[in-house]
Image (spheres, grey):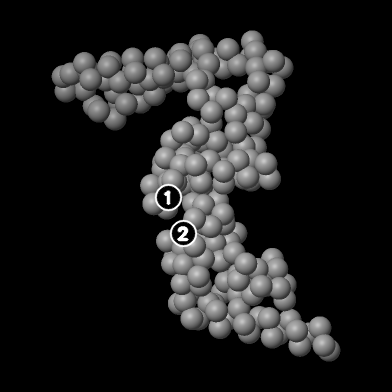
């Protein structure tokens, strides 16, 4: 009974917190599932966790909340959250799975109106914990969210495995696709040159028969 009471009291505190800052009350259960009765303590330690992928609150909102709670502008949790936000934002809005380290540091410093040295330290801490992965990409140091790096690595591994397993078949498939595209383009040009009073339905029928024949020969 005591444990149930503690959980209910913890949930109530989270609901009060969310209501105070006009956040969706549905977040309460998400926070409770993640942190249990200690959810409110987790929010007090780091309100920027709200802007993480698990909860999806905009960074500007969690930043305003944190600053109102007395967090300083150069706090480590703020800087780390800024780094993660920049990576996530560029992935979702621009489709970029990584950012060059130099660009990431500069963008985060501008977002937070801070200095690059503080951002560099926060980024190194995230790399050490594995939240961010850094890898050489061409001539730059690319920084990835961990899940983006895992996804890219998986795709590359699968493509390499396919090429190693059946390279001849893949080449044949590519050639076959090219033949089909050429056949379709040729059929379109032939239909465009056709004139006179011929029945258009009949012309279309002949074109489809010719196209089927071309597909069979291509295959």
38 or 152: nearer the viewer? 38
Residue 73's label in the rendered image is 2
**Residue tagged by mark 1?**
114
174 or 14: nearer the viewer? 14
Q: Residue at x 16, y 19 (%)?
A: 196
Circle 2 SS class: loop
Q: Residue at x 44, y 67 (%)?
A: 64
From the top left corner, tell me how far across and down residue 39 is, in percent.
67, 72
Q: Residue at x 29, y 30 (%)?
A: 201
Q: Residue at x 51, y 65 (%)?
A: 71
Give the quadrant of residue 146.
top right
189 or 134: nearer the viewer? 134
Q: Quadrant of the C terminus?
A: top right
180 or 153: nearer the viewer? 153
Assess whether mark 1 and mark 2 are in contact (beta carbons under 8 angstroms): yes
Q: Earlier in the sequence, mark 2 or mark 1?
A: 2
From the top left corner, tell me how far across and down residue 97 is, in percent.
52, 37
From the top left corner, tell me how far across and down residue 35 is, in percent.
70, 68
Q: Distance from label 2 to label 1 (Cα)? A: 8 Å
User: Alpha-carbon neighbours of circle 2 within 10 Å: few (<14), some, or many (≥20)?
Assistant: some
Q: Quadrant of the N terminus?
A: bottom right
On screen, residue 6 versus residue 74, left or right, reads right
Circle 1 SS class: loop
């Amino acid at each position: 009974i005591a444990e149930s009471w503690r959980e209910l009291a913890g949930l109530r505190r989270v609901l009060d917190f969310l209501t105070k800052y006009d956040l969706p009350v549905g977040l309460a259960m998400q926070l409770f599932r993640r942190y249990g009765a200690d959810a409110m303590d987790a929010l007090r330690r780091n309100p920027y966790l709200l802007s993480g992928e698990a909860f999806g609150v905009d960074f500007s909102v969690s930043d305003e909340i944190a600053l109102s709670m007395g967090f300083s502008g150069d706090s480590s949790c703020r800087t780390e959250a800024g780094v993660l936000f920049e990576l996530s934002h560029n992935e979702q809005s621009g489709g970029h799975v990584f950012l060059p380290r130099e660009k990431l540091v500069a963008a985060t410093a501008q977002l937070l109106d801070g200095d690059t040295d503080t951002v560099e330290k926060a980024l190194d801490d995230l790399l050490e914990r594995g939240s961010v992965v850094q890898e050489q990409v061409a001539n730059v140091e690319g920084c990835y969210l961990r899940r983006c790096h895992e996804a890219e690595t998986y795709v590359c591994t699968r493509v390499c495995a396919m090429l190693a397993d059946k390279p001849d078949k893949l080449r044949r498939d590519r050639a076959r696709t090219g033949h089909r595209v050429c056949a379709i383009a040729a059929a379109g040009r032939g239909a465009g040159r056709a004139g006179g009073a011929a029945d258009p339905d009949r012309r279309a029928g002949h074109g489809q028969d010719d196209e089927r024949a071309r597909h069979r020969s291509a295959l």
